[in-house]
Amino acid sequence: MVSDTNDGRGWRPRPPTTQQQPNDFHAHFISQNVQGFNGDKQQVLYAQMRQRGVFLSCLQETWQVQTSLIDENAGIVIVRANTIPPAGRGHASGGLAIVLSHPARRAWSDASSYVARYGPRVMAVRLKMRDSEDKALDILVVCANAPTSEKPAAEREEFLSQAT
């Protein structure tokens, strides 16, 4: 169950309601356009994930030019390289990353470290976990970055076919 709220100062866990039991399974996910994922932004994200108990983060517009798997003290960063060249902007556009906390890293490892790429704008990781009642959960987390409305219709259609 994802139970976050944005109060203008960032994501904060929502207090349990009367319907939630103290041992309910909770996994907090965030997704954001980072407009470049450099060393400074990486360190801020890792600190925020630890501080707020974020399980997994999906990032768009990382502007990375290489596909890589980076082992960090916050977990693992799985970067999907972007195939859209700089085109006079000084940086590439696009790029995706999924950042796993230590518990998410274990769930990803339990799912045989599965990563799927569906073109330059869509990627996914599989997680295997157990809920509070010990029921097996097989979760596919998809990270995607849709083209803007200014892009050609063919590019938007290609994205939709890759994302479904």
Image: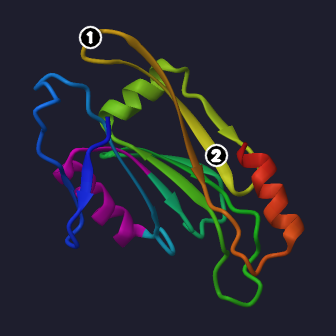
- Residue at 59% in and 70% down: 63
Predominant SS along the magenta part: helix
| Residue 26 in picture, x, y percent from top left | 26, 33
- Of 80 and 139, the residue lying toward us: 139
As displayed, is residue 7 above or below residue 114? below
SS at circle 1: loop
Residue 10, numbered circle: none
Find residue 25 and report its image quarter: top left
CA gap, disc 1 to disc 2? 30 Å
Q: Residue at x 51, y 73 (%)?
A: 36
Disc 2 residue type (three-letter):
Met
Place of residue 34 in the rendered image (x, y in percent of width and height, measured from the top left)? 46, 70
As drawn, the residue found furthest toward the bottom would be 88
Q: Relative to 61, does residue 110 appear above or below in the rendering?
A: above
**Residue beneath the point at 66% across and 57% down:** 81
Q: Name the kind of residue labelled 1 in the image.
A: Glu
Residue 84 lies left or right of residue 133; in this view the side is right
Q: Secondary structure at mark 2?
A: strand
Which residue in the structure is indicated by mark 1? 133
In the displayed structure, 130 sits above or below 40; it is above
Q: Earlier in the sequence, mark 1 or mark 2?
A: 2
Task: Give x and y (percent) for residue 156.
Answer: 79, 64
Q: Let me know if residue 46 is in the magenta part.
A: yes
Quarter of the picture containing the C terminus is: top right
Rendered residue at 10%/33% (across/down) = 18
Q: Which residue, given by chain and number where applicable, does mark 2 sit on?
A: 123
Looking at the rendered image, the quarter that the N terminus falls into is top left
- Neighbours of disc 1 within 10 Å: few (<14), some (14-19), many (20+): few
Q: Which residues are magenta?
A: 39-57
